[in-house]
Image (cartoon, rainbow, N blue to C red):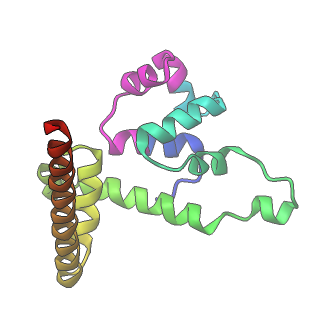
Amino acid sequence: MANNTLEQYLKDLRKSCNYSQEFVASHLNITRQTYSHYETGRVIPPVNSLYNLAKLYGVPVENFLDLVVTYNINMDFALKPQDNRLDMTEDLSFFIEYINAPENSKKFKFLNRWERQFLFYFLLMDKRDQDDILTFMKVKYQNRSKEKKLANYVKKPAEEQ
């Protein structure tokens, strides 16, 4: 199911993170009823709310703006769906279906939003790509550990003086 409306996108994002309307509303400093109006399409969220929603969900604010802003360049452009937005919404729908499937729900139940996304995409990769990702993560971790040790070493001699 490809969602192409702001209200459906808001609902899908909220559900993918297992947030309640009350939680999202409190994050935006609005009432739950007002946020409910965003998800039903009765009210279009103001720009500052779109920005805060983008920060909350870790998505580009352009994802919201593409669903809200009407382009007046020419009617062909305004009526033609943007390919990258369709890919993104189809991807989100697939993600929601995947994590809510009974056979997968236990894997994702206690994970935060970032861990869910990581595990979701990781499981979709083939074995070779999974090995590459794990190797990359190990190298990144080792490099960060070396940087921290070096930073601590540089601080200690300066403190001893």
Say if residue 144 shows up in the picture. yes
Q: Residue at x 17, y 75 (%)?
A: 135
Say if residue 110 shows up in the picture. no
Magenta span has 33?
yes
Placement of 135 over or under 29, stated as above or below: below
Residue 103 at what x, y percent from top left? 13, 58
The reply, left or right, for residue 56 in relation to residue 159 is right
**104 vs 85, nearest the viewer:** 85
- Dominant SS of magenta comes to helix
The reply, left or right, for residue 65 in relation to residue 53 is right
Q: Residue at x 58, y 53 (%)?
A: 4
Placement of 2 over or under 36, stated as above or below: below
Placement of 62 over or under 81, stated as above or below: above
- The quarter holding residue 118 reads bottom left
The reply, left or right, for residue 106 in relation to residue 113 is left
**48 vs 22, nearest the viewer:** 48
The reply, left or right, for residue 60 in relation to residue 100 is right
Placement of 43 over or under 6, stated as above or below: above
Residue 65 at what x, y percent from top left? 65, 46
Q: Residue at x 65, y 33 (%)?
A: 47
The residue at the far front in this view is 161
The residue at the far top in this view is 31
* Quadrant the C terminus occupies: top left
- The quarter holding residue 17 reads top left
Q: Which residues are magenta?
A: 13-35
Residue 89 at what x, y percent from top left? 49, 58
**73 vs 58, nearest the viewer:** 58
- The quarter holding residue 109 reads top left
